[in-house]
Image: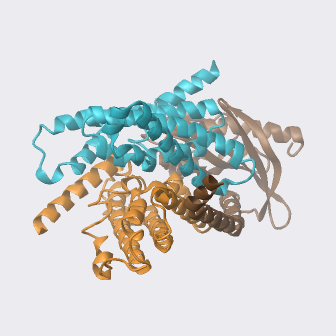
Amino acid sequence: MSKVKFFIEQSWLLIVAALLFGVLLAGAQTGLNPRIKANEEKKLSDSMKMLITDANHFELVAEDVEIPTGKKVVLSDVYRGVTQSGDIAGYAFIAEGAGFADKIRLVIATDVGFTRYMGYKVMFSNETPGFGDKVKNDFYSQQYVGAPIQRLELAKAGDNLVIDQRIVAISGATVSSDAVIKIFNTFGRKIKSQLQAQGVIQ
Amino acid sequence: MSDISTPALGPTFTAGFWKENPVLRLLLGMCPTLAVTAALKPALTMGCCVIFVLTCSNIVVSLMRNLLKPHLRILMFTLTIATFVTIADLILKAFAADMSAALGPYVPLIIVNCIIICRAEACASKNGLVVSVIDALGMGLGFTMTLCVLAGIREVLSTGKLMEVSVMPSAFVPWAAMGMPVGAFITLGLMLGLVNIIAKKTS
Amino acid sequence: MDTLNTLLLGFISIVLINNLVLTKFLGICPFLGVSGRIDMAFGMGMAVTFVVTLSGILTWMIDHFLLMPFGLEVMRYVCFILVIAGAVQLVEMYVRKFFPPLYESFGIFLPLITTNCAILGLCLFINLWEINSLLEASVLSFGAGVGFTMAICIMAGIRENLNLVDVPQCFRGAPITLITAGLLTMAFMGFSGMIK
């Protein structure tokens, strides 16, 4: 009994403090969690709104679609942009792949008929600043707006204003440029066939 | 409850800026200094987080300084600091989500930031509440200042912009290396050397 | 075979390409402090490797079997740092009992490993990279330790030579070490992109 008493005598402050801190953390967590969740959702819907400008709000049409990408299976969510009058404005889905340094996570938008891409926004990337990071810039990302949903190719040189399946790479960042193209090629047609199988699009 | 000698508040506050600047003189807290100073905004955010955690932990440690058992004190410090860092991380995620994503794992690394544990050990566990708070603010502000100077230099040279406002003439070709680890190490090394020169000249 | 491939690539990547000290800025304090001599640096590296492997495995298990199933992610940082402190304490007791001369030579450094950013940093990176297998987590932890040891020993070798050269007075110690580290980082940049 005296051993237990000695133990408690030595560490009562630790135990009390641990309990108090636990309560403090639980309080902070419950207080701030809804706001944190709202932030995440807002980031996604803001990006999608920038790509599909006509859309008023977005509906989830397919959740956790499994797309195998080499090493791992990525779960993608597909959203449908709906205008104020109820018409479909376009589709958007999450895509992910390996970049130069770390993974690259994009939200890709397509038009109503799922025939052309409407561009992408980078949700997460850790590419080399000044080089691979330029995949976020308009020079590179605008080439995807209007590009056909077929196999895209990387071109080392060319006119970046001509919209077709040839994408001009960022000079000094070929690997990052190619990574984005690979993500488009892996996800674009697979998501399209998945939606066709589900009867969402023709 | 009475301390042997209460240090004067003024010198305690200003010590953190130059004489005992945590990064430049005491060589503590190097890891976040190099990691988040690629741009000014993350550096400022990190500085604010450190000030928050340092002040809160100094307050708590100072309040319980007479109850601490000697061999458990490091554990107590660590527990306190970890709690406040978690809270700071949650606040950051809730109110500044893009900064939280930019700083990434370096916010929880404030737990092992030597500055906070050293100040808790050296100052808060031996002094009253007011002195501890002043010391925390001084050290925190000194740290933030150093971080901002380093980040400012690195951002201007690596992108020609400061907080997304162009400051360099358009003919300037950005030094991309400044945004990478190379630039971080070399700039900090040169800053330390400069500080040593100035310290030597003024002493 | 595929698993072995992933493990091997993961190991090489964390030792060379994503080296914790030179690319992720972790463990700088001991990197500057202990890299004076190669034998001390190697000893520190070995201690860190042991602690980081143990911590990586333990924190992964706690995260996946205790925190995530019960939704206790908010306790993550507190749990991690307590596990690391416990692991360091364990190593200290073990070394003191079985290798007393080694314990003497370590001095203050062993308890200081607790505040080594590299260990907590690695546990957090394993969390961030969403590593889902215990085997991969343990290989990465071991690799992190090896990478740290390698970086600190290279630095120690360079610093031993720097002692013989005429460095300006105000740059001796930390400044020249940092500049050297910068050049070392630049050299290691050549490894990036090696593995896709």
Q: Is residue B120 above or below residue C158?
A: below
Question: Is residue B155 toward the left or the right of residue C143 in the image?
Answer: left
Residue at point 28% right, 53% down? B187
Q: How did the renderer colour the structure?
A: by chain
- Position of the N terminus of chain C, as image quadrant, is top right
> Is residue A21 left or right of C20 when viewed as pictured?
right
Left or right, B1 with reference to C31:
right
Residue sitting at the far top: C1
Return the x and y of residue B25 as percentages of the image width and height: 26, 61
Q: Which chain is brown?
A: A
Q: Position of residue B162 (x, y in %)?
A: 38, 65
The answer to whether one can see residue A93 in this image is yes
Which one of the lettered chains is coloured cyan? C
Question: Number of marks in the image?
Answer: 0
Q: Position of residue A41 (x, y in %)?
A: 71, 60
Which chain does orange denote in the image? B
Comparing A143 with B114, the one in front is: B114
Residue C187 appears in the rendering: no
Residue visible at 81% across and 67% down in the picture: A84
